[in-house]
Amino acid sequence: MSTQTQSASRAFVWRRVHSLMGLWLVIYLIEHLIVNSQAALWLGDDGIGFIRMVNWLEALPYLQVIEIALIGVPLVIHGYWGVKRALSAKSNAGQSNGATPSLQYERNRSFTWQRLTSWILLVGIIGHVVQMRFVQMPKEVRQENQIVYVTHLQADAGLASLAERIQVKIVKEGDRAVAIAKTPGKAMLLMVRETFKSPLMCSLYSIFVLAAAFHAFNGFWTSLITWGALLSYRSQRAMIPVCWVGVALLAFLGLAAIWGSYWVNLRN
């Protein structure tokens, strides 16, 4: 087998792996946004759905192994090959002086946006993981022979009332506050609320979510072709509106979590 043939064969395999990891990440994204949206969608319930789901997830055995194997590894593989493709891709959907092609068709524009959203997601995912998993992640500590979860917050007018309703202890330190919760779900609910108190964070996360929603379902459409599920032009065209519905649903769940957690459901 020639070197060129081997290279083409490896590229073929890795493109399939990249696509497969992307399909798995779409499933994970749907689950992640469903959980997060529970902090906002059911008005007046104080995020009880979010608390229950997070408590269930946090109670899974070998959770860190599961997160690394089922989230971390697919993200690294898909991200690595996605960046390689983004660096080598050349958009042909924009204006041109005639020296380069200018094909301003729907799928050409989608190709361009898939590459642009990949860069937004690269920055957004790194920032999201650093913030939520390291900077703001509630700390698990032992207090009076039991495990509690500690979250540092900025005190506000509605915090004490919410904390009382969900049975979280608040210790004020000037304009700061420490929340002491008996379950990880309650602590993480307050962490999410704290993040989305900031209009700047809401705006940045909105861009992140919209990019993820488009990237997920545009990539899903492409993967169906890659794996031979959509072979005819008619089937490919018919699937586009379905994928746009998927984009809209993901965007709704994400934006509801962002703008509804504090500003609608958990402010007071």
Image (cartoon, rainbow, N blue to C red):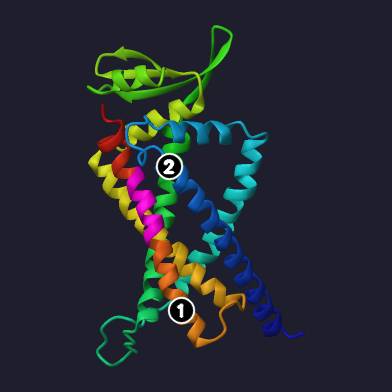
Q: Along the line of sight, which residue is nearer the eye, 261 or 174?
A: 261
Report whether residue 197 is seen: no
Q: Which residue is mark 2?
A: 36
Q: Is residue 252 magenta?
A: yes
Q: Residue at x 57, y 36 (%)?
A: 57
Distance Cα–Cα, label 2 vs label 1:
31 Å
List x then y, in percent, for residue 121.
42, 56
Q: Is residue 122 left or right of residue 203?
A: right
* Number of disc labels: 2
Look at discs 2 and 1 and give the one toward the viewer.
Answer: 1
List x then y, in percent, for residue 31.
51, 49
Q: Amino acid at mark 1?
A: Ala
Above or below — where is 234 with respect to 149?
Answer: below
Residue 238 disc label: 1
Q: Is residue 170 magenta?
A: no
Q: Along the line of sight, which residue is nearer the eye, 219 or 5?
A: 219
Q: Along the line of sight, which residue is nearer the eye, 18 or 107?
A: 107
Q: Amino acid at mark 2?
A: Asn
Q: Which residues are magenta?
A: 248-257
Label 2: state its secondary structure: helix
List x then y, in percent, for residue 247.
40, 62
Between discs 2 and 1, the one toward the N terminus: 2
Q: Residue furthest bottom?
A: 98
